[in-house]
Image (cartoon, rainbow, N blue to C red):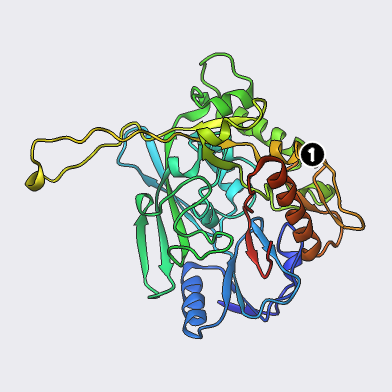
């Protein structure tokens, strides 16, 4: 590991906010990363890890602690126990979109719809990244991580991460602490070997995005190309010449609400069912089974609601700014809060709070921020 002269976080985050922290360490190998974290934890100091800086909203005051930059790289192909599939073990600091490009080039399917998502691989399972109906939990096998409480390194199966809609046991939700304080060192994915022919697309969101009308196989390269074009049109691909991309992507999460709540929204509000686990089983230990099988409990169906629609229909249009503010809504996508030129974190937070108040007043729903907030309150 290397202790370096701290760099202003405004230069390392896509929202372009944040002063230089008190201390900064760069880790370019797994061993360096482990050593750096153990040292920081032993000192009982404030800390956070920094990958691509694309899901981070940092306050204006200097961070009084250590920032550990994860700069590890590497993609290792491994055999899969499942026929027609392959596994990739990827270092946490690997660029996510570079990984997607690698899988497409090698005919490995499973994450191609997540093309163009900024950030690093290690951050992907933390919030269960996804796009167009595809999520990392569908291909994630396990993660290698180091726990803050013990400093121990272990391999944890995906089933123990409590992966849900943009969440996991590792995520620092606004207003709370993660259920498990740990840092991911590497990620292992299990992908389908489909080659150049590609595969049929089943998910409705992705089919709609690609404009598909039949079930013919679609080459992975075509999927990636079209998704990148869609994201670019929404200002969701990083471009130094486009201020609409100076954002943390979607600043607010789409809401997951009971279908009874969704039914009270205007019918034109976009929504998607969150499918229940239809294969869930009731397990009764044999030693206590008395011959009675309890009736199945009613299934509460949840619905995902478009936060972008709620924002626009609360009267906040694309390109909106508060008076004299250098923060604004993207001119291309209502979910992206953007830094239009040296905006402070205070200006961005003021805009975020304004949006929350307007949406709550109009629809009775409270939008929650998606980025990790450091030194900022909404």
Q: Secondary structure at mark 1?
A: loop
**Residue 333: image location, x then y, percent:** 75, 40
Q: Residues within 10 Å of mark 1 (few under 14, many from 20)?
A: some
Q: Which of 119/252 is in front?
A: 252
- Where is residue 51 shown, x and y percent of the image? 60, 61
Residue at the top extreme of this rendering: 214
Residue lying at 76% horizontally and 40% vertically, measured from the top left: 314
Quarter of the image with the N terminus is: bottom right
Point 69% across, 53% down: residue: 248
Residue at 50% over, 55% down: 126
Do we see residue 10 in this rendering?
yes
Above or below, 171 relative to 88: below
Q: At x 78% / y 55%, what residue is drawn?
A: 351
Above or below: residue 77 compared with residue 194: below
Judge by depth and name the residue closer to the eye, 333 or 49.
333
Task: Give the residue number, with chain letter if any, for mark 1.
Answer: 332
Which quarter of the picture shows residue 324?
bottom right
Q: Quadrant of residue 340?
A: bottom right
Q: Residue furthest right?
A: 324
374 relative position to 161: left or right: right
Quadrant of image for the C terminus: bottom right
Residue 335 is at least partly visible in this image? no
| Relative to 369, 45 lies left or right | left
């Amino acid at each position: 590991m290397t202790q370096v002269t701290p760099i202003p976080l405004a230069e390392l985050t896509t929202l372009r906010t944040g002063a230089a922290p008190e201390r900064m360490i760069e880790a370019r190998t797994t061993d360096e990363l482990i050593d750096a974290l153990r040292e920081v934890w032993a000192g009982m100091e404030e800390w956070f890890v920094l990958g691509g800086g694309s899901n981070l909203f940092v306050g204006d005051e200097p961070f009084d602690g250590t920032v550990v930059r994860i700069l590890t790289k590497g993609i290792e192909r491994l055999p899969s126990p499942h026929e027609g599939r392959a596994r990739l073990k990827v270092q946490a600091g690997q660029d996510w979109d570079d990984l997607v490009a690698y899988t497409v080039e090698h005919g490995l399917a499973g994450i191609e719809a997540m093309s163009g998502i900024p950030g690093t691989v290690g951050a992907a399972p933390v919030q269960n990244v996804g796009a167009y109906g595809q999520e990392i939990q569908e291909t994630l096998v396990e993660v290698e991580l180091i726990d803050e409480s013990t400093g121990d390194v272990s391999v944890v199966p995906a089933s123990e991460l409590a992966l849900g809609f943009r969440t996991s046991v590792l995520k620092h939700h606004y207003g709370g602490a993660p259920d498990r304080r740990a840092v991911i060192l590497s990620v292992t994915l299990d992908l389908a070997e489909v080659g150049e022919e590609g595969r049929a697309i089943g998910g409705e969101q992705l089919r709609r995005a690609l404009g598909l009308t039949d079930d013919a196989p679609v080459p992975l390269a075509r999927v990636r190309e079209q998704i990148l074009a869609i994201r670019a049109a929404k200002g969701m691909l990083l471009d130094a010449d486009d201020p609409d991309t100076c954002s943390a992507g979607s600043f607010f999460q789409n809401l997951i609400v009971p279908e009874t709540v969704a039914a009270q929204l205007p019918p034109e509000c976009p929504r998607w069912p969150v499918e229940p686990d239809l294969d869930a089983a009731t397990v009764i230990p044999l030693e206590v089974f008395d011959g009675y099988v309890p009736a199945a409990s009613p299934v509460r169906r949840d619905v995902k609601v478009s936060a972008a629609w709620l924002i626009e229909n609360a009267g906040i249009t694309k390109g909106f700014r508060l008076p004299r503010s250098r923060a604004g809504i993207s001119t291309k996508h209502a979910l992206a809060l953007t830094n239009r030129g040296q905006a402070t974190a205070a200006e961005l937070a003021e805009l975020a709070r304004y949006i929350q108040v307007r949406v709550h007043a109009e629809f009775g729903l409270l939008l929650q921020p998606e980025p990790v907030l450091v030194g900022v309150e909404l």
